[in-house]
């Protein structure tokens, strides 16, 4: 069968393999026909050789962690043939740590977790894959064109879950949210905010194109000026750029008792002249919280699946700005200026 692979740590090793082995039954009882995988920045970094880890004893890693497939067989009865399904990316470590032991593997403390298409587990960019029932998330049939958005949606579902948990420290009645960065994570974070009835503000450098239009379709107010020039203080900030200046300005912008969730990952290596003392003073005196959030556990995947099923399917489809057949796989991994989400398609 066909599979898209790389040799981790070797830039330029991206290739389409025509005779990749069928998935082993050790991977799980549920056999899935791949429909598509989403492409994200993590894939680009693995292709560039920045990181990635092949399964034990293997040289190559199958890419793809934003999955969408259709069940071919499930002897466990968890799902039925024909059901739409996505595979959860992260699996708990084998020790396990206290969090992995209770299903909170997104909060793994010892780093021995594994991840499909990223770390020691084959990814979903192959014609067929297998998954264990506990890591198989059934999708509403209406998500047949957009189900590969479930993985990024699970990331923001976790972010909002943790925002709620932190907010519960006091009387928490947030009214406004600022989302910085109108990429897939940012737009999905704004979607979940709009479903909560919040006053949504989005900030991005793009002054035209699909991002302002997609924001407007959510009823959000769109900004493309620097964060420190905004004339309001949001109760919640969801930072999705990882740009150091934006991160710091977002931390300074939150309202008293505000919560800032950092989902963007900075590349590092950049020094900024910044008054850290003033930031510390504001955070302490205003009882603000800044926290980081990455990955998701089963609870968040289920929350995300429900959120996507409630969303306008036309709006979700608009997030996918390019659909590339596997026969032209290399095009899917070439970043375009107007890309929001690219889908590599295997079958329909």
Image: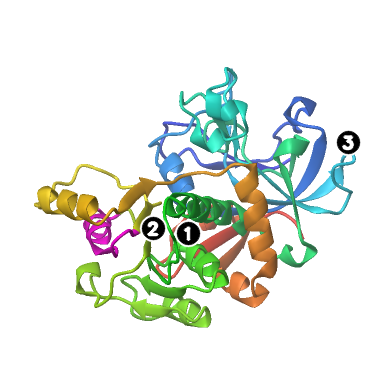
Q: Secondary structure at mark 1?
A: helix
Which scheme is used to colour this image of the protein? rainbow
Question: Is residue 60 something one can see in this rendering?
Answer: no
Q: Is residue 274 left or right of residue 259?
A: left
Alpha carbon distance from label 1 to label 3:
33 Å
**Percent position (x, y) of residue 272?**
13, 51
Q: Which residues are magenta?
A: 243-258
Instruction: Name the residue rendered at 64%, 46% in the picture.
Output: 299
Residue 241 colored in magenta in the image: no
Q: Main secondary structure of the magenta part?
A: helix
Q: Which residue in the structure is indicated by mark 3? A: 76
Q: Which residue in the structure is indicated by mark 1? A: 185
Q: Nearer the viewer, residue 101 or 51?
A: 101
Q: Is residue 53 above or below residue 135?
A: above
**Percent position (x, y) of residue 100?**
57, 28
Alpha carbon distance from label 3 to label 2:
38 Å
**Residue neighbourhood size for the residue with mark 2, other residues' Cα within 10 Å, grouped as few (<14), some (14–19), many (≥20):** many
């Amino acid at each position: 069968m066909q599979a898209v692979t790389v040799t981790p740590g070797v830039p330029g090793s991206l290739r389409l393999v025509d005779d990749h082995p069928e998935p082993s039954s050790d991977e799980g009882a549920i056999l899935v026909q791949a429909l598509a995988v989403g492409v994200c920045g993590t894939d680009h970094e693995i292709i560039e050789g920045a990181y990635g880890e092949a399964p034990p004893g293997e040289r190559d890693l199958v890419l793809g962690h934003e999955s969408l497939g259709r069940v071919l067989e499930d002897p466990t009865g968890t799902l039925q043939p024909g059901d739409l399904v996505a595979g959860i990316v992260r699996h708990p470590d084998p020790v396990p740590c206290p969090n992995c032991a209770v299903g909170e593997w997104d909060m793994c403390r010892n780093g021995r977790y594994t991840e499909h298409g990223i770390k020691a587990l084959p990814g979903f960019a192959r014609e067929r894959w297998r998954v264990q029932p506990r890591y198989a998330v059934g999708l509403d049939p209406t998500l047949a064109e957009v189900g590969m958005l479930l993985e990024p949606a699970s990331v923001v579902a976790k972010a909002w879950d943790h925002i709620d948990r932190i907010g519960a420290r006091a009387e928490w009645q947030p009214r406004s949210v600022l989302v910085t960065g109108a990429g897939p994570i940012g737009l999905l974070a704004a979607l979940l905010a709009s479903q909560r009835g919040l006053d949504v503000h989005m900030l991005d450098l793009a002054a035209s194109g699909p991002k302002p239009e997609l924001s407007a379709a959510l009823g959000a107010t769109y900004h493309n000026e620097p964060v420190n020039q905004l004339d309001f203080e949001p109760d919640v900030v969801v930072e999705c750029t990882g740009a150091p200046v934006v991160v710091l300005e977002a931390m300074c912008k939150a309202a008293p008792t505000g919560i800032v969730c950092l989902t963007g990952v900075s590349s590092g290596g950049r020094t900024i002249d910044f008054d850290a003392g003033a930031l510390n003073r504001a955070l302490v005196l205003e009882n603000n919280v800044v926290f980081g959030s990455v990955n998701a556990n089963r609870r968040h995947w289920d929350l995300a699946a429900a959120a996507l099923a409630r969303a306008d399917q036309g709006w979700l489809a608009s997030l996918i700005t390019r659909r590339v057949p596997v026969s032209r796989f290399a095009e899917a991994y070439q970043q375009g200026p107007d890309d929001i989400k690219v889908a590599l398609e295997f079958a329909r």
